[in-house]
Image (cartoon, rainbow, N blue to C red):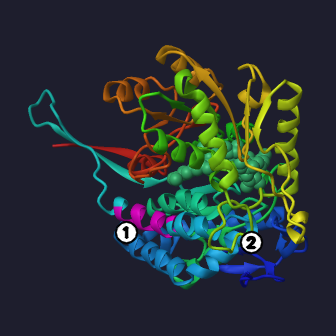
Amino acid sequence: MTQAIPHAGGRLRNFIGGAFRDSEHTFANINPVDGSEINRVCRASRSDVDGAVDAARQALQGDWGTMSAAQRAVVLHRVADGIEARFDEFVAAEMADTGKSLQQASSIDIPRGAANFRIFADLQKSRATECFHTATDDGRGALNYAVDKPLGVVAVIAPWNLPLLLLTWKLAPAMAAGNAVIAKPSEETPATATLLAEVMRDAGVPAGAFNLVHGFGPGCTGEWITSHSGVDAITFTGESKTGSAIMRAAADGVKPISFELGGKNAALIFADCDFDAAVEGTARSVFTNGGQVCLCTERVYVERKIFPQFVAALKQKAEALNIGWPQDADTDMGPLISHKHRDKVLSFFSSARADGAEVITGGDIPKFNDTRDSGAFVQPTIFTGLPETADIVRKEVFGPVCHIAPFDSEEEAIQLANNTDYGLAATVWTDNLQRAHRVAGVMDVGIAWVNTWYLRDLRTPFGGVKLSGIGREGGAHSLSFYSEPMNICIKL
Ligand code: NAD
Ligand code: 6OD
């Protein structure tokens, strides 16, 4: 089955001050299914970044800056309408850039792109601010109230794993709160962000309120944005070590930062769980998007009395996954994002073997005997038998792999789950209500799921502790990062 790729063979341009702009330098946008080039991408120059910052500043002083939250909400709902109207193009572009399955792109990534705009547009409209009546010695009192103001020009730096979903998860609240934005998608996944720029233009977003610049991170577009004196705040999703570099860049201007970073998430499977649901849910949490979701489980701990049965059942699920062409309706898993990333994942597999791991399943590159052999595929993989000190147990792999190990008591399970430098998510499988509350509550993470995984309510706090991030996104948490409350005190 083949499917048209929007802009295929074309040029993806930057979008600055309401207009698409070409640039002197381009780079290739590669399809990881077979390694072919999809498009040339215009790499933003330093002066493009300056232009985007100037355009954003002007938008704040012009039409965008004078709109009410209700007026911005109308525009942002039109953006959501525009994504939905071009749904198939967005799905095809996301699949081409990432190799993710049609099933995933059309049920998660692209619908969430539209939903992100709708929810934050509506939440901002109904947002309340504080107001206090303050007692004074003369008995007349004072009225203290807060006014929320946008931060100004916000840089939005996004990763490649859920490109449209994660970019809009930041853009939507930033724009709903009245900021002007400069978006930089990952160099691996520029296509849906470029389609989004067309949608923004066609939805009547005032020039400069949304700007898009393409390029790489260090020594390039990403670094030029994050170190730019005209940028007022930075919101970033990506690797923890990139977060450290951006934090250093933000230090000079003492800029507010919001970081969603890496994870090394544990699943705890207790013997009293619904076994089939736990196997199904754990397989989903390990292998969704080829394991390339920050929330994916990479460490599975199973109560010893069900350990052999659980390992066998998870192995069966892994081996039943259909790895193939993204556009086929029955494909469960496509390739990894790139050959470079596959090399990284395979080097973790080698180090696991060198550390003495037993391979339960996978551990290699699948063979197709067609053009997919030039793609970036790896097999769904399960290792066991390693000490907690092994690299693959400690470091984020970001691939379709987990290490599985037994535990003997609830205390040991909790200790194992929390014994990591990361703190994004944990999953607990148990039918014991007391245990569910007890264990979930002491997980050292931002999000604990019980008897489910990646069940999202966009109003809830989302983020990580330790190396997994700074701050919380979601609902009012996002809106509060993207605005600054100002206190006005009126003596009565
Ligand atoms: P990455 O950190 O390599 O890149 C993310 C973005 O940052 C890209 O746009 C990149 O060009 C840019 N960038 C890189 N170096 C930069 C620099 N020095 N200055 C400015 N920008 C720079 O991450 P990735 O490989 O695209 O994504 C995978 C990682 O993201 C994994 O670690 C994953 O766990 C994490 N992630 C976390 C979450 C979360 O919500 N916690 C969500 C998705 C991905
Ligand atoms: O669903 C979301 O809102 C979200 N931020 C998901 C992050 C996934 C990480 O890869």
Does residue 89 sit above or below 66 in this rendering? below
Q: Is residue 147 magenta?
A: no
The number of numbered discs placed on residues in the rendered structure image is 2
Does residue 204 sit above or below 344 in this rendering? below
Left or right: residue 383 versus residue 277 is: right
- Near-viewer residue (468 or 111): 111
Of tags 1 and 2, which is closer to the observer?
Answer: 2
- Near-viewer residue (259 or 407): 407
- Assign the C terminus to one quadrant of the image: top left
Q: Is residue 120 magenta?
A: yes
Identify the amino acid type marked 1: Ser
Picture residue at 57% right of the left edge, 49% below the top: 284
**In the image, which disc is placed on residue 96?**
2
Q: Does residue 339 appear anywhere in the picture?
A: yes
Q: Picture coordinates of residue 208 (x, y %)?
A: 61, 72
* SS type, badge 2: helix
Does residue 315 sit above or below 117 in this rendering? above
Residue 282 position by quadrant: top right
**In the image, which disc is placed on residue 68?**
1
- Assign the N terminus to one quadrant of the image: bottom right
**In the image, which disc is placed on residue 146?**
none
- Near-viewer residue (148 or 390): 390
* Magenta residue span: 112-122
Picture residue at 51% right of the left edge, 26% below the top: 444
